[in-house]
Amino acid sequence: MADSRSDTVPDHRSLLSSPEYVDELYAQWRDDPSSVSEHWRSFFSGFDLGAGSAAPSSDEAADQSRVASLIFAYRNVGHLIADVDPLGDGERHETVFDLETHGLTEAHLDRVYDTGHLGGPKQATLREIIESLRLTYCRKIGVEYIHIQDREIRRWLQNEMEPHHNRPPIPTETKRRLLEQLTNAEIFESFLNTRYQGQKRFSLEGMESVIPALHQTMDTAAEGGVEEVVMGMAHRGRLNVLVNILGKPLEMVFHEFEDNLRTTDEADGDVKYHRGYSSGYTTSSGKSLHISLTANPSHLEAVDPVVEGRARAKQRRRQDTETRTKVLPVLLHGDAAFAGQGLVAETFNLSQLPGYRTGGTLHIIVNNQIGFTTTAAEARSSRYPTDIAKLVEAPIFHVNGDDPEAVAWIVDLAVRFRQEFHRDVVVDIIGYRRWGHNEGDEPAFTQPLMYQKIANRPPVREIYQLQLESEHAITLDESARLRDERQGLLIAAHRSAQESCPMPGEDVHAFHELWDGLDKSFSFSPVDTAVTPETLNRIAAALTTVPDDFELNRKVARRLPAVRKTVEEGGDIDWPLAELLAFGSLLTEGSPVRLSGQDSVRGTFSHRHAAWYDTHTQQAHVPLNHIDGEHATFCVYNSMLSEAAVLGFDYGYSLVEPNMLVLWEAQFGDFANGAQVIIDQFITPAMDKWQRGSGIVMLLPHGYEGQGPEHSNAYLERYLTLCAESNIQVCNLTTPAQYFHALRRQLKRDFRRPLVIMSPKSLLRSKLCVSPMAELTGGSFREILDDPAPPKKPRRLLLCSGKIYYDLVEGRKAADIDDVAVVRVEQLYPFNSELFHDVTAPYRDAAEVAWVQEETRNRGGWGYMLPILLEAFPDRQVRYIGRGPSASPATGSPRVHKQQQQAIVDEALGE
Ligand SMILES: Cc1ncc(C[n+]2csc(CCOP(=O)(O)OP(=O)(O)O)c2C)c(N)n1
Ligand SMILES: [Mg+2]
């Protein structure tokens, strides 16, 4: 463990520093005055009457307050001296527990005091009180819970822990089961060690108690009404968990070690300790659960928000949106990663938010007290790796991994806590890592002393077996048989793996049927995304009807008649309206929509107003949830100020829900680089690595408008470098109708692919950027858009993408130019070469072909488009027109910006 930093321990000398205890006694007195001693009775009655006689009137009362102070010290920081470290050096001393610290002496030990309800007698000698506190708070479990501000929760925990000193008796049958689970965990690792020596498996040895911990999780969860557990974990012990908890066939694991597992034809696959799995689980009492382990990248903790998003979507599926007790998210963390990765804090912060809460997550820390070669003292500034969990006032249980009974009990308590309070809870299982970071690594290079200790330490299975033998809970023969049977199973599976390998059944995925038929390859085949005028009018009615007694903001109200009229008369639809109509149309077709992002409800640019707020009550009204007739729900949320966790969450959500339009919006597109790990490790490669589809939409406001280096550029080029094998779709759209069809298209095809959209800012209000309603009630998405006013004899063909189009056509009009054609690439990837060829065919005789962009030369579409254009126009030089290369995306000067923008247009249209 980290050094004991006793200088941080508060002094509990005075009564005032133990309000907790007085508070408890006061509540007790109010319930039943006879339950406290006479001194406290008179103290509280004086206190209650406000008679000013608040001070205890005798030495005895003063002593009682000193005892109260000591009791509080144990509850508060008893964990400091708990025996939670299997590698620890025995008992530690903290002055906070000394009698003198609290003004007490040996002479007080045999006097009787109020116990403050330790679950036992209401009064006891100080000696008994201390004994009881030490048993509860200072044995193999250290508890941190006094930071929880809700008194009811603290009391609930006390009542769970104190009556039986945080260790209820365990039936023999359970003990034998624990031993069997430990045996299975240990033998699996040692078998792999002998058969596949030196191959990476990130052994769980030293932390085998994680396996009984997870079995207990399932048992308690199922008893508490959980139907499904969604898990996320890192490399450590993952194979062990896959086999021993998820029941992945041993043959499959062996095949993976031999590197000849059958995968689907084109997929590149992933290393074995990153793969996901899902299966049914039967608890010790015969209840059934579904468990899924989310596939994850090497990037530690990146899977956390993805697991949460999956869990939330599954909760919705199971109509578990109130208490969220049917689906339990469980995250396993390494000690170093938990303390180091910011995503952990971000994920905690999601845990109680309206659009993101999942009813509490069980966090299990696989605390082997090391991260690769890094010690605890190097890995964190906090005492424990778990301190970050105090952010959400989670109870934190530190437990000695060499005591499987303590582990099982505390996990049981933790899961019941989650089911009761719907909040996060942390179990920090402290053990060690028997070998190096991986099986080819030498830990003695860096931690020679630690590893001497570890070498002398028997495995937890052995320790527990001896305990059970001495308790006559099991005989030597029985425990040997447990080992032999397991070993025999492994040998048989290894042998049969040489002959054949089972594939996981399709039905192992809960809700897998939702994806039926949605696994086809990407295709440009047009899909019917047009919507009837009647439907649009129905939606427009909802968008413009103010409920009775609702006082709508005047500025918002002012726009409504025009919206109504536009749709009724089939006028020009702007971007914000096209978006709401697209959402509304999907809702009327039974497809829910989830939109999440910073300030997404109103819209960063004040354009969306997805909810209205009553000017008197601030009550929200979401017009799209009031469309006449039956329709699905529009779930729109302002997210917390994070990119990685929120995008990860929404991506996770999209994995479960192919028939829901799931959108994540960046405040400005460049902020998405804070979520780069989710983009690089999940969204773009997931299909190739894990055969997992997603239809998530990323809205990234983009465009050079003089706002400076930030807020101008959404790094289009980054997404384009990640494109291959039709993994994602990258669009830079110019018309509201295109946006409308692109959104609807997401749910209308027989495949799902993430959609990245460079979305507009100033164009949201541009009079030019509108589409006649006929383009919504007819037509479909076009990857390439032709010039709406095609010149007959073009001397130059300009190709572009996004907002610069409007500058070009405006410039062309202003200068009365009629020999320059402008063609827009609306979808850059996958690139529709055939359509491009058809659209550009009439302009092939143009003397010159140029790519025009407003982004700097090292950004935007140029680098990606150049080879495409060279191939499309083999006999031409393709000219670049745009900003020069620049380290920074854009100038900080609006004046310079304007000059640059003008220069691009001038060059594009000039002679
Ligand atoms: C984000 C990230 N940074 C760095 C690494 C490289 N890395 C892999 S394992 C590891 C140590 C992890 O320590 P801990 O979280 O305690 O887990 P343990 O291996 O001890 O179980 C590191 C640094 C990584 N996988 N992910
Ligand atoms: Mg570790």
Image (cartoon, helix red, strand yellow):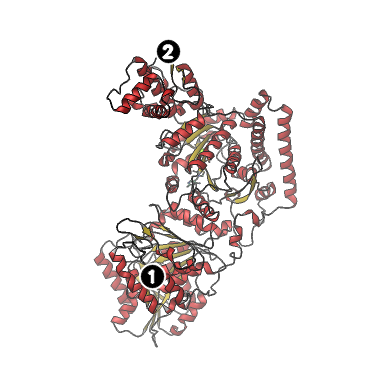
Residue 43: percent from left, percent from top: 34, 22
**Residue flagged by tag 2: what amino acid is it?**
Glu
Q: Nearer the viewer, residue 236 or 578?
A: 578
Q: Neighbour class for label 1 at 10 Å: few (<14), some, many (≥20)? A: many
Q: Neighbour class for label 2 at 10 Å: few (<14), some, many (≥20)? A: few
Residue 424: percent from left, percent from top: 47, 42
Secondary element at image label 2: helix
Residue 422: percent from left, percent from top: 48, 44
Furthest residue to the bottom?
792
Residue 770 shows in the view: no
For residue 554, side relative to residue 470 (left or right): left
Furthest residue to the top?
107
**Residue flagged by tag 1: what amino acid is it?**
Leu
For residue 748, side relative to residue 498 (left or right): left
Mark 1 vs 2, N-terminal side:
2
381 in relation to 643, above or below: above
Rendered residue at 50%/73% (across/down): 529
Q: Which residue is mark 1?
A: 577
Rendered residue at 40%/70% (across/down): 541
How far, Cα to Cα, is label 1 from label 2?
79 Å
For residue 425, side relative to residue 57 (left or right): right
Image quadrant holding the C terminus, namely bottom left
Q: Nearer the viewer, residue 784 or 736?
A: 736
Q: Nearer the viewer, residue 552 or 247?
A: 552
Q: Nearer the viewer, residue 596 or 838?
A: 596
Rendered residue at 74%/50% (across/down): 498
Residue 226 shows in the view: yes
Secondary element at image label 1: helix
Q: Which mark is residue 401?
A: none
Rendered residue at 73%/53% (across/down): 500
Furthest residue to the left?
895
Q: Which residue is mark 2?
A: 106
